[in-house]
Structure formats: C-alpha cells, structure tokens
Image (tube, rainbow, N blue to C red):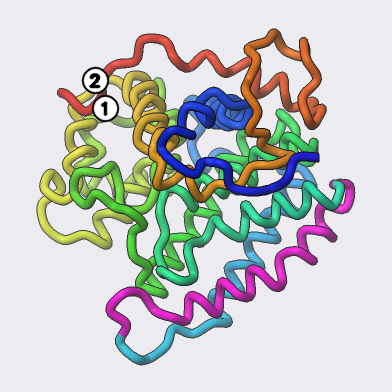
Amino acid sequence: MEEFKTRVKNESDMDAWESSEAYDDYIGFITAMNKSVYAIPSNKTLTLSNEISQLLNVLNTIDDWITEVEPLKESCRFGNKAFSTFYNLLKTRLPEILSKELSSVDQQNIIELTAYIVDSFGNPTRIDYGTGHEMSFCMFLCGLYKVDVLKQSDSKATVNVLFSRYLEIVRRLQLRYQMEPAGSHGAWSLDDYQFVPFVWGSAQLIENPDFNPNLFVDEKCVQQFKSKYMFLGCIDFIMQVKKGLFHEHSNQLWNISGVQSWNKINEGLIKMYKKEVLGKFPIIQHVPFGNLFNFKQCIKKKPFATPSAIKTPALSLLEKLKKTDQSVPNIVNK
C-alpha cells in the first residue's frame, strides 16, 4: 500500500512526476475522454448508467450546499470568507456520502477519491480556484475508472454530464464567493480558472458543420451555441466576467481563433496543457499520490504486460489512447 502524500517537493522532482505511472495514467485519461467526445455535442442525448446518475446526484448535493451557505455581507477584497464554510461542509459531509455511493470500493481508495474531489472546488484559505483544482476533479474521475466504478461505456457521459455539471458548480462558486484565480497569468493565460473544458470542448467541435474556429469570438455565435458546445460555454463565461475587447483580455484564445481546424486546435491544446499545467511545479507540488496514482517510474509496456498497483479493466481505455505526442502544431502562433 502506497502512502498517500505529496511527492513533488522541488523543481527537480518534476522529472520523476513526468516519468511516473501517475502521469501516464492521467494523460491517458485526458486523451481517452477527449477521443470519446469527438464530434459529440454537450446536448446530445445519452443513456446514463446508474453509476453516472449516482455521481450526478452527489454533484447536485454539493450544489445544494452552496445555496445553504450565504455569502457574508461585509465587503471582502480577496474573496468571500463564506467559501471556507462551504468547504468545511465538503470535508465533513462528503466522506460518508462517497462511502455509501461507492460501497464496492475499498476504504483506502475511498479516502484518496474523497481527497481529490474535496480539493477540486478551491482553496479555503486563499479563497481561490485554478487549474490545479480542476486537475483534482479529473483525477477523481480517472480514479473512478481505476477502481472500476465507471466503465468505458461511461466515457461520453463522464465529459458531457459529470464534467459539465462540475463546471457549472465551480463557476457558481467563483461568482458567489468572489474567488480569486489561483496563480493566474492574467491576459496571457488561456483562462483565469479553467483549461480542460477547452481541450474536451474543442474535441466536441471536430468535423463541426456549424462554424469555423474564427467564429468562436463572435458574440452572436457564442450565444447561439453556448449550451451545445463546452468550448463556447467557456467563451460565454469569459464574456460575462471580463470587460473590454476580447483580444486584449483573452489574447491566447484570440490567437487560437486563427487556427484553421478544430482538429489542430485540439491537438495543440493537449500539448499546451502538458506544458502549462502538468509541467508547472506550483501546481503539481500540491498533488497527493498513493494507491490510485502511483508515483513510481513508469515502465513503458504493452497493455496488461505488467499488473499495475490497481488491476483495472479501464486500463485498456487508458493504454489505447496514450499516443498523443505526435508532431503537434504550436497553436498560439497564427
């Protein structure tokens, strides 16, 4: 049993992270989910498994807790301290709910899954939210495949139902409690808060008949398609919370609108995600590793050649789709 703890203590540990089983499994999950929603819009009707429905209920319950915790009336310059009260509800109530909903999962894995989902809604001290918290939620989802709660047939719903619902909740948190962006680079980052929905959202738009990439900065186009495509939902949220000219407040996205195809945008965003999120020490230093995400060196192997720490039928899903490092264009240069 691997001790569950953070392992990236300084910059020199980043090499170990990038060559670990945890990294391999995580990026495999991101690309597997990405491929599952190629040309599948958010509003496409899906048949949901019982497991997806149960997890959706958990997210809906978390949303109810936000309603329960009113923001403090006093003016707060750096986030509303009521967020800490909401976070305390997560920490105290979620373990029991997950133990009940995931009754087939052993206790150590429940502890790790709970830690990932609790951390995915923001930091209670700084009252901020960023791509590290988003990564925690993706690790929670990936962990559910590793313990065989979710199956390959759930992959479309994992993105279009569970992750979409998560996005709605964290946006509500950001606005309700005036959450700061965690480690934002301001106008020069992709977005103050999110990254993964741009990746999976661009996958939804591959081979899209509705519009070319250069139209996603057009406000009429955004309003028409924001509920159909995750990428447009992201642009809509940016347009709500930021004032001024789009090319000034969201320069990276403006540049991306000059790329000719959604396929190229999608490939480029995966490469950018590895560099700008998975390759950043300030983010990875907070990530705990243990049973579900093992920090030991990854031995490149054929599927099922070596048993992993957790034997998982989902491994085929993760293994099959790891070929993401072909020559990928630099999407930020028109």
In x, y percent, where is residue 294? 67, 34
The quarter in which the N terminus is drawn is top right
| Left or right of 27 on screen, residue 312 | right
Residue 34 visible in the shown view: no
**Label pair 2/1, CB-CB below 8 angstroms:** yes
Residue that badge 1 annotates = 212
In x, y percent, where is residue 52? 71, 47
Report the amino acid beneath label 1. Answer: Asn
* Residue span colored magenta: 76-105
Element carrying mark 2: loop
Does the magenta stretch mainly form a helix, a strand or a loop? helix
Report the amino acid beneath label 2. Answer: Gln
Decide: few, some or many residues near mark 2? Use Cα within 10 Å; few <14, some 14-19, many ≥20: some
Q: Is residue 101 magenta?
A: yes
Instruction: Tell me which residue sits at (70%, 60%) in the image.
Output: 57
Instruction: Tell me which residue sits at (54%, 74%) in the image.
Output: 66
Q: Where is 81 relative to 147, above or below?
A: below
**Numbered badge on residue 260:** 2
In x, y percent, where is residue 151? 75, 33
Disc nearer the start of the sequence (2/1): 1
The quarter in which the C terminus is drawn is top left
Count the labels in the image.
Answer: 2
Q: Where is 298 relative to 6, above or below?
A: above
